[in-house]
Amino acid sequence: MTGAQALVKCLELEHVEYVFGYPGAVICPVFDALLDSSIKLVLCRQEQNAAHEASGYTRISRKPAVAIATSGPGATNLMTGIATAYADSIPMVLITGQVDSKLMGTDGFQETDTSGAVESFVKYSYIVHDPEEIPRIVKEAFYIAQSGRPGPVLIDLPMDMQTGTVEEFSYPDKVQLRSYKPTVNGHPLQMERVLKALTEARRPLIIAGGGIHLSNAVPVFREFVRKYRIPVVSTMMGLSILPTEDPLNFGMVGNNGHTFGNRAIRHADLIIMAGARVADRTIRDPALIEQKLLVHIDVDPAEIGKNAGPAIPLVGDIRHILKAFCAKEPQVNYDPWIAYLTDVRADWMRKFKAREIPSGIDPERFMRALSQAMEDDAVYVSDVGQNQLWSCAFVVIRNGRFLTSGGMGTMGYALPAAIGAKLGAPDRQVVAVCGDGAFQMTMMELATARQYGVPVKLVIIRNNALGLVRQFQHFHYHDRFSGTTLGGDPDLSFIAKAYGMDYFHLSKGAYTDRLIGEFLADSNASAILECDVDPDYLA
Amino acid sequence: MKRIYSVLVENHAGVLSKVAGLFWRRCFNIESLAVGETDDPGVSNMIIVSSGDGHILEQIEKQLNKKVDVIKVKTFDESEAVSRELMLVKIRYSRSTRRDIVENCQLMGASIIDISESMMTLQICDTPERVRIFLKMMQNNRIVEITRTGTLALTKCTETSVPANG
C-alpha cells in the first residue's frame, strides 16, 4: 500500500471518525485515500477553522481529533488553530502535506518549514523520512497528543512519503518512548501533606482549571468537592466544572472574573490550584497567592512553580489524584468560611438584579437569559472579546459545557468550534456566541455547516465595533478609537438567507425571552440571532 | 548563578534546534553548548551551561524535561563537576615574541600544533577558567582566528556514582 493509504489505515485504527481539512496538491494522496475510508471528511473553508473544528469536536466527544492541510499557505493558515489548541492543551493530530523530500530546503513552490515554524506551539512534531515509519509515527502522535498534558502533535508528510510504498503494514500495539513517561498518580507523601494542610486550614479554596475537563475528571471533582465541602472558584477554562448555581461554586477569578471569586482568593488561607496554571489573566499578582499556603496539582511539572512557587507541589493526573482523595475520610469543616462567601455572592447577585435596565439591550442579562433557556446539557461556545467576558460572568451552566479559546484568545473560534462540537455530540444543543468582529473572521464556515447538515445556532452580538479593544482605548487612550470601528454595515439577515438559515433580530430588550425561545426552538434548523448592543456598553 | 545541564537526548535530526529554540523562546541564556554522541549511537549528550536566578535555573530543568526528545536531565554546579574546554587559537608571531609565546604555552600546558614562518596554532584543553586565562595571555599577540568547544562536563567521581554491579 502507499504511505497515504497507510496513514488513513492508521487513522481508522485510532478510531478517527472525522477529519477536518482542506486539500492542496501535495496532500492529494491522503485525500484520495480518504475516499476509500469510513472516515468522514469535513471540508472547512479555511485551514485555521479545521483546527478549531477539531478542537470543538474533541472537547465535547473526547474522540481523537485530526486536521489536515496542504503545505505552505495551507500549513501556515492552520497554525493559528494549532497555537490556539496548544494554549488550551487541546489534544489533536495535525497532518500537513509537504513538498517532495528531495525538494525540501530548495524553497520549492508552496514550501515552508512547517515543523520548524510550529515548534514552540506544538507538543511534538514529526517529519516523515520513510513511508515505513508512518504506522509508528501515527501511533506515537496520538499517544503523545492525548496523554500527560494534552496538546497538538504535527506530522509533516512529504509528497513522496505519501506516494511511496509501505511493504508490510503493521500497526504497533503500544508506543515505546523511553523519553516520555507522564506521571499519573500523585506521590503519597505529597498527598498526605495536602491532607494535613486541609485539616489545619480554615479558609481553603480550590481554583479549578481546564485540566479537570481535559482529564475527564469532572464527576470525580464534584464528588471530591461535595465530600470535603471546599469552596471552588474557576479559571475561564474551568467554567462548567461545577454547575454555576452549585452552592460551592464561587464564580470565575481573574481580571475578568467575579468580584466575589477574587475576594475569595484574597481571604483564603489555603489555595489549591487544580489543573490550572497560574496564568497572568487568572492571577494578576502571583505574590498575592504566594502569601498563602499554595498547593499546586498539575500533570505538567513545568507549570508548578513557573509563575508562583507552591508550598506543596503535587504532580499527576488530576482524575487519579482526586479519586485517591475521595477514598480518604477527612475531618474538616469549613462552614463559617462557606457562609461568609455565600453572603458575598448573594450581595453581588442582589446588586445585579437591582441594576437599572438600560434603554437598549443589556448584554449581561441577555447572556444569562440565553443560557437559562438552553437545555440542561447544552454546549455554550463563546468567542473572544466583550461577548466572552459577558458570557463568562453571566451564563448559567447546569450540566452543560462552556467552551472558549482561553489561552490564545483567538477571535473567530466560536463558530467552527461549535460546528465541531455539534458533530461530536449531535444530540446535544450547541450554541455559539460571538461578536460581529469575530463573526466576520470565520463566517465562511456557515457554508461548511450547511454542506454537512450541521445545525448551527449562532448569536452575533452586534455593536459595529471591536468592543474589547475599543474599551481598552476608552480607558487607556482617552477615547482615541483607532481601528476599532466596524463599518460596512453588512446586513446579517441577507447572510442568514444566503446560507439558508433562520434569522432573528433583537434590537430592544422587551421580548428577549420570547425571541430566544423562538431562536432555540427548532433543533434541526440553523439560525442566526443578531443582538444589538450599544458600543459604549463596557464589559 | 551558573549551572551546568547534562542532557541526554534522542539522536534525531532537529533535536538540537528544538532544545536551542526552547532557550530562545523562554529567554533563557546559553553560555555554552556542546553536543556529541554517547556510547549509544541513538543517544546524544548535550552539555549546556546557563545562568540565571534560582527560579530560572529550575524552569530550565523542567522545560528541558518536558521536551519529548529529552531522555534525562542532570544538573549540577561547576564545583560538583570536572569540566574541560578545547580551544585552538591561530596567532601571528615574530622572532621577538616567539620565546614569550612558547613560555606561556609551557606554563599553561598548551601545545603548538601547527606552525609556519609567521603564524602558529596553539591548542589548550583545560577548565573553562584556565582557557580564558590562556586566551587573555595570548591577546598581546595578533590573533588571526579562534575556535573553541563549549564546556564538556561530568560530575565528579564519587562512590555513589559507581553502578552497584560495577
Image (cartoon, rainbow, N blue to C red):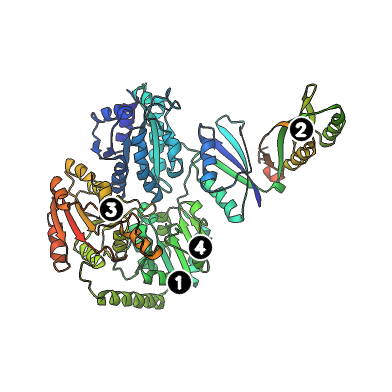
Separation (CA) of disc 3 from disc 2: 64 Å
Q: Residues within 10 Å of mark 2 (few under 14, many from 20)?
A: few
Residue under the image location 55 percent in, 45 percent down: B23
Q: Amino acid at mark 2?
A: Arg
- Callout 3 touching callout 2 (CB < 8 Å): no
- Callout 2 touching callout 4 (CB < 8 Å): no
Q: Amino acid at mark 3?
A: Gly
Residue of label 3? A437
Chain identifier of the residue bearing label 2 in the image: B
3 or 1: mark nearer the eye: 3
1 or 4: mark nearer the eye: 1
Q: Quadrant of residue A104?
A: top left
On residue A192, the disc is 4
Residue of label 2? B142
Above or below residue A332? Residue A530 is above
- Callout 3 touching callout 1 (CB < 8 Å): no
Circles 2 and 1 on the same chain:
no
- Callout 1 touching callout 4 (CB < 8 Å): no
